[in-house]
Amino acid sequence: MQYSELKTAIQDYCQNSETTFVNHINDFIIAAEDKIFATISMPAFWKSDVDQVCADGTAEYELDAGVLDIFSVRVSEGTTAQSSGVAFGPVRYLMRKDYDFMLEAYPGTASASEKGIPKYYAVSSSGVSTSDPTMTIRLGPIPDAVYPMTVDYYEKVAANSITNGSTDANKTWLSVSFPDVLLYGALTQAYIFMKGEQDILQAYEMKFNEGLSLIKNLGEGRQVSDAYTDGTKSVPAQ
C-alpha cells in the first residue's frame, strides 16, 4: 500500500474529507506506526551501527540517531581498524550492566582508572537529535586501545514512517507486508479524533489488535527460529 492509497482509504472508511481531519491524517498514521514499533520486535526494525570505534581512554559513546533499545554490543579483540564494523574474530560480546555499577567499578578518574578490553556496557543517557531519539553508552573497562565496535539496536526514526516527505508513492516494510494492520491502526486513531460511535471504534481496535498478534507471531516466533533447530511447527489435528 502506498501513502496515497492509505490516505484515501482512511478518508473513505471514515467518510470524512473535512480540512481539519485531512490535516491530521499523518498524525493518525504515525501514532499507529509508533504503537506497532513499540509493541512488536521485528527484524525489519533492527539496525546495526557499524561505524563505532573505541578510543583509548574514552568511556562513553553516542550511537546513531534512532536508537530506542539495544540488542547487543560487541567489540573485536584485535585493534586492526575496520570500516564495516566487527567482521572478524575473536569477537567479545559485552554484558549489559547498570550505569551506577559502571561508575563504581570503572570510574575513569586520574586516581582510579582501570583500562582494558571492554567487558560491559551500560546506557549512559538518552536524548533527541532533531526529530530522532539518541542514546549514549558507557564501556567498562575503559578501552585501552582502538577496538572496532558494532551495536545492534532497535530503530525508530522519522524516515521509517510512510508519511516521511508525504510523497504519494511512499512505501514501507509495514505498508507492504501488513497494510491492513497499518490501516486499522490509523483508523482507530482517526475515529478517536472524530469521537465516533463506540461500536465502530471497538471493531477497528479489534481488527488492529488481531493484526498485531499476527505480526508478533511472525517477528517473535517464526523469524527467530528455523526448522533445523526447532523442528517444523504443526497445528494439532481437529
Image: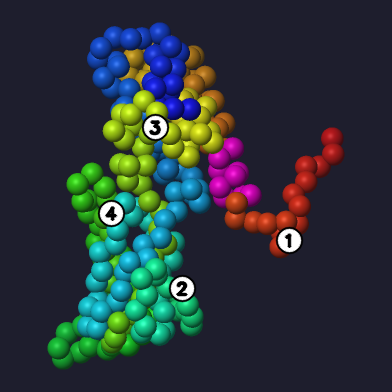
Q: Are marks 4 and 3 in contact (CB under 8 Å)?
A: no
> Where is 103 relative to 72, above or below?
below
Which amino acid type corresponds to the residue marked 2 in the rendered image?
Ala
Report the span colored magenta: 214-222
**How far is the residue under mark 1 from the one under mark 4?**
37 Å
Residue 232 visible from this viewpoint: yes
Q: Which residue is mark 2?
A: 87
Which amino acid type corresponds to the residue marked 3 in the rendered image?
Asn
Mark in front: 3 vs 1: 3
Q: Which residue is mark 3?
A: 170
Label 3: which secondary element: loop
Label 2: which secondary element: loop
Q: Residue furthest bottom?
A: 111
**How far is the residue under mark 1 from the one under mark 2?**
25 Å
In terms of sequence position, does the residue under pointer 4 or pointer 3 come before the other? 4
Q: Position of residue 74 (x, y in %)?
A: 42, 73
Q: Dot 1: within a 10 Å radius of its alpha carbon, few (fewer than 14), some, or many (20 or more) residues? A: few
Residue 187 visible from this viewpoint: no
Which amino acid type corresponds to the residue marked 1 in the rendered image?
Tyr
In terms of sequence position, does the residue under pointer 1 or pointer 4 come before the other? 4
In this view of the protein, which residue sits in the foreground, 172 or 234? 172
Quarter holding the C terminus? top right
For residue 228, the mark is: 1
**How far is the residue under mark 4 from the one under mark 3?**
22 Å
In terms of sequence position, does the residue under pointer 3 or pointer 2 come before the other? 2
Q: Position of residue 206 (x, y in %)?
A: 53, 25
Label 1: which secondary element: helix
Which amino acid type corresponds to the residue marked 4 in the rendered image?
Ala
For residue 65, the mark is: 4
> Where is 87 relative to 20, above or below?
below
